[in-house]
Amino acid sequence: MHILSTRKGGLAVAALSALALASLVAAACGGDDDNTTPTKAATTAAATTAASSSTSGASAIPANIGKDDKAQLTGAGATFPAPVYQAWFDDYNKNVAKGVQVNYQPVGSGGGINQFTAKTVDFGASDAAMSDDELAKSPDAQHVPTVIGAITVAYNVNGLSKPLQLDGPTIAGIYLGTIKNWDDQAIKALNPDAKLPSSGIVVVYRSDSSGTSYNFTDYLSKVSPDWKTKVGTNKAPNWPVGQGGKGNDGVTNVVKQTPNAIGYVELQYAKANNVAFADVKNKAGKFVTPSVDSASASAAGVTLPDDYRTTITDASGDGAYPITAMTYLLVYKSTGKCSQQQPLVDFLWWAYHDQSAQKTVKDLYYAPLPAQVLPKVEATLKSLKCDDGSKPSLKGS
């Protein structure tokens, strides 16, 4: 099986196989050097944490505010940001707050929302903002955006010498089942020099309730009236064709192991597993490669609502990659226990303000939040309370 040789690079030590990602839960339970995590070597020492302060200049609270905290935190949710979250948890435990350990279960965004709503975890994680109905069941929920990532259209087609070029209507046609073969005229028109096989396309989708699916289908709904009418935007849509894989890692492995397959996965998973992915035509008519820079370009002009609930797919701008998502942690506004909530919010402050933490974001092919968003996030963290609103969740706020 031939996998496109270009764009393989990047953090081989961070390679994510299904087994490696499955180890996230065990690795998150502590800072043991014997634990195997997909991003361990990508973390950088937080040696300058003690001297760090807000990069926005808006606050004098140091990045290592939680260095003396002690807590065992549990969280569950999105697989999309799991590599960077695991890297953060590991780095924070080893270099900043040795008394804080985090067990994060990458169960998918839908599972994360459910566990957060049931209050069986200290925090949830989702790439899809909670709906009005979901918020009605969890009125104390606060969305906190963390990072931005590109959702690649990954494929396994033998014999191609350069990346495929695809557009929204063609991707929608593939997932609707109206484009069935790799040499379909719609694909050939976008790739006139490619030697496309006549083989049938094996469509792969997320089998679990997924924020990655939500953003992928949100994009397709914006670029394809047929998709919007027949399927729509959903964390767990009724897929017209294809086979499922659980989590970003599951879809990645199915695509990698299945000739003529196509699937949608976050950029880190495609990069770490050497899976080829397409350049996608954006709203400006440009074919754009998914990358840190093109994901950043998609978020550059976003105006976030007060509750942060939005999508950034199909963004304007020549350099904007069109299938880009922002991901969130879900925390409690006031009902969390201070013994858990304070260490969690202190950790978040570190993640936004420590230079090594933000370097890790880019090292793992995610994009940091736009600089203009940070003061808004700082204000949100300072507003959080715990023990039924009796105490601030962030030290020094």
Image: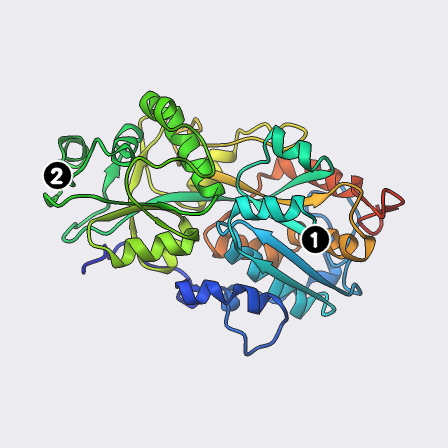
Quadrant where the C terminus lies? top right
Task: Give the residue displayed 59% in from the left and 53% down from the top.
Answer: 76
Q: Secondary structure at mark 1?
A: loop
Q: Quadrant of the N terminus?
A: bottom left
Amino acid type indicated by mark 1:
Asp
Residue 254, relative to residue 311: is it above or below? below
Residue 359's image quarter? bottom right
Q: Secondary structure at mark 2?
A: loop
- 247 or 264, nearer to the observer: 247
Position of residue 12 relative to residue 195, above or below, is: below
Q: Nearer the viewer, residue 290 or 260?
A: 260
Are dots 2 and 1 in contact, CB under 8 Å?
no
Instruction: Describe residue 378's horizontal placement relative to residue 216 as left or right.
Output: right
| Tag in front: 2 or 1 | 1
Q: Quadrant of residue 50?
A: bottom right
Decide which of tag 2 and tag 1 comes sooner along the chain.
1
- x and y percent of residue 350 in the render? 69, 54
Q: Residue furthest right?
A: 390
Q: Which residue is mark 1?
A: 122
Left or right for 306, reference 2: right
**Residue sitting at 76 percent across and 41 percent down?**
333
Does 26 sit left or right of 342 as displayed? left
On screen, residue 223 above or below 121: above
- Where, by quadrant of the figure, is residue 382 drawn? top right
Q: Which mark is residue 274?
A: none
Residue 227 in percent (x, y) is at 34, 26
Residue 183: numbered disc:
2
Residue 298 in view here: yes
